[in-house]
Image: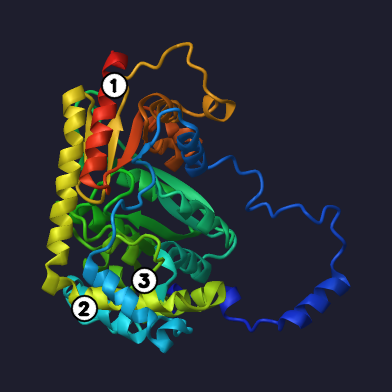
Amino acid sequence: MSLMLLARPTLRLSLPLLPPRTATRAMSATAPARADPFKPAARVAGQRKDVWSIVNEAAAASPVQPIVNMGQGFFGYNPPNFVLDAAKAALDRVDCNQYSPTKGRPRLKKAIAESYSPFFGRQLDPETEVTITTGANEGMLSAFMGFVEPGDEVIVFEPFFDQYISNIEMPGGKLVYVPMHPPKDGATKTTSAAEWTVDLKELEAAITPKTRMIVLNTPHNPIGKVFSKDELKAIGDLCVKHNILILSDEVYDRLNYVPFTRIATLSPEIAKLTLTVGSAGKNFYATGWRVGWLIGPEHLIKYVSAAHTRICFSSVSPLQEATAVAFEDADKHGFWETAKKDMKGKMDKFNAIWDELGLPYSDPEGGYFVLVNMAKVKLPEDYQFPPHVADRPRDFKLCWFLIQEIGVAAIPPTEFFTDKNAHIAEDWLRFAVCKNDDVLEQAQDRLRALKKYLQ
């Protein structure tokens, strides 16, 4: 198949748009009146309460206050001073308070190209191979909007970051799920996150002529798995064989505790199919900045940029400039190695509580999440759960119980599985360790109260 056919954009990006008033007149003249003008679109209707709302509302209402929040993956501390100083300086510049080019500020694209070129083994072109987005999440939405037509199939691995699902559904994509299999003895002893595996036969069986894209996440949220070079090569070769695009979510790429491979570097053929996603929020402890990017070949990046232009036109100017400075100055501050060392230290420090309690966990290879198996925790039989928790899998009940009785918030990972495969994770909880050390210590003190519920 030719490269042009491989990288075909969706029709919505290749046709001119009607001016808004013309479009409105045309619609009003021909469209029938809605029976219910307030009825939402199907893509947002009928969704059950999401996990973030459940956990945050439970935390606010818990009798144990203040809650130790180890649920959502926001940092409990600021970016380093050289990054904050760059943001403050950017606010004093007129151009940094106005629109940035839709593809991103040139200084930031150049800084990303310079920082990532050594990882890719070649010089990246900042003008054609890098595009800036409003956070990694909007970048992924732009990739889906740029290449997924209604009815196209997109393969995601379970567990998945929940935003993938709505982002794929927005352009009319059909989700196809392939489960990752946990260690067989993960409920009885601590194992490596590497032991969560993808069955390549299951993956290839899920591929059809309608498969347009595969979404990969490494280091993985919530597992903490770093896909090995061999695993990535096998997945990449399947995509080459079947002409499938790869969206590689690598937002935790600077927090790897084992050797880390980027799938786009494994062969020229795989590189032609791959879009790599990055995040300033994850790199520089600034999840609220909403600065992300995609790296990839020009024949893919240009359509991501086209979709991004239609979604939000451009991203936050002063924080783009600050991110550029952060990349430029990171090495001279020894930031990357310090960040990795500090996060691994937090992970090891916090996980000591599970060793003390005798609760097995999945030892992460990257990122800042840890999955803990709580099959040994026996919930009181007469404990009253609210209806929206009672009808969910056991991990939601565990989560609610920890918030109400222990004062520690975590995330139930079945939210990242389909109902069919939720049983894989119903005894696990996800904890975020990107918090100050005193918070980790307070969490440990409270978690010791679980001893009386262990069986």
Expressed as whole percent of the image width and height from the top left, the position of residue 285 reads 29, 60
Expressed as whole percent of the image width and height from the top left, the position of residue 200 reads 31, 47
Q: Residue at x 24, y 39 (%)?
A: 440
Q: Of helix, strand and loop, which one carries label 1?
A: helix
Q: Residue at x 52, y 65 (%)?
A: 148
The crowd level at tag 1 (other Cα within 10 Å; few <14, some 14-19, many 20+) is some
Q: Residue at x 43, y 27 (%)?
A: 404
Among the 4 quarters of the image, the one containing residue 71:
top left
Q: Are marks 2 and 1 in contact (CB under 8 Å)?
A: no
Q: Which residue is mark 1?
A: 449
- 1 or 3: tag closer to the N-terminus: 3
CA distance separating discs 2 and 3: 18 Å
CA distance separating discs 1 and 3: 44 Å
Q: Are marks 2 and 3 in contact (CB under 8 Å)?
A: no
- 2 or 3: tag closer to the N-terminus: 3
Q: Are marks 1 and 3 in contact (CB under 8 Å)?
A: no
Which quadrant would the N terminus be assigned to in this image?
Answer: bottom left
Q: Of helix, strand and loop, which one carries label 3?
A: strand
The label nearer to you, 2 versus 1, is 1
CA distance separating discs 2 and 1: 46 Å
- Please state if 31 lies on the left or on the right of 283 as rendered: right
* 290, 253: nearer the viewer: 290
The crowd level at tag 3 (other Cα within 10 Å; few <14, some 14-19, many 20+) is many
Q: Which residue is mark 2?
A: 328
The crowd level at tag 2 (other Cα within 10 Å; few <14, some 14-19, many 20+) is some
Q: Which residue is mark 3?
A: 294
- Please state if 224 lies on the left or on the right of 258 as rendered: right
* 57, 206: nearer the viewer: 57
Of the residues shown, which amino acid type is indicated by label 2?
Glu
Of the residues shown, which amino acid type is indicated by label 1?
Ala
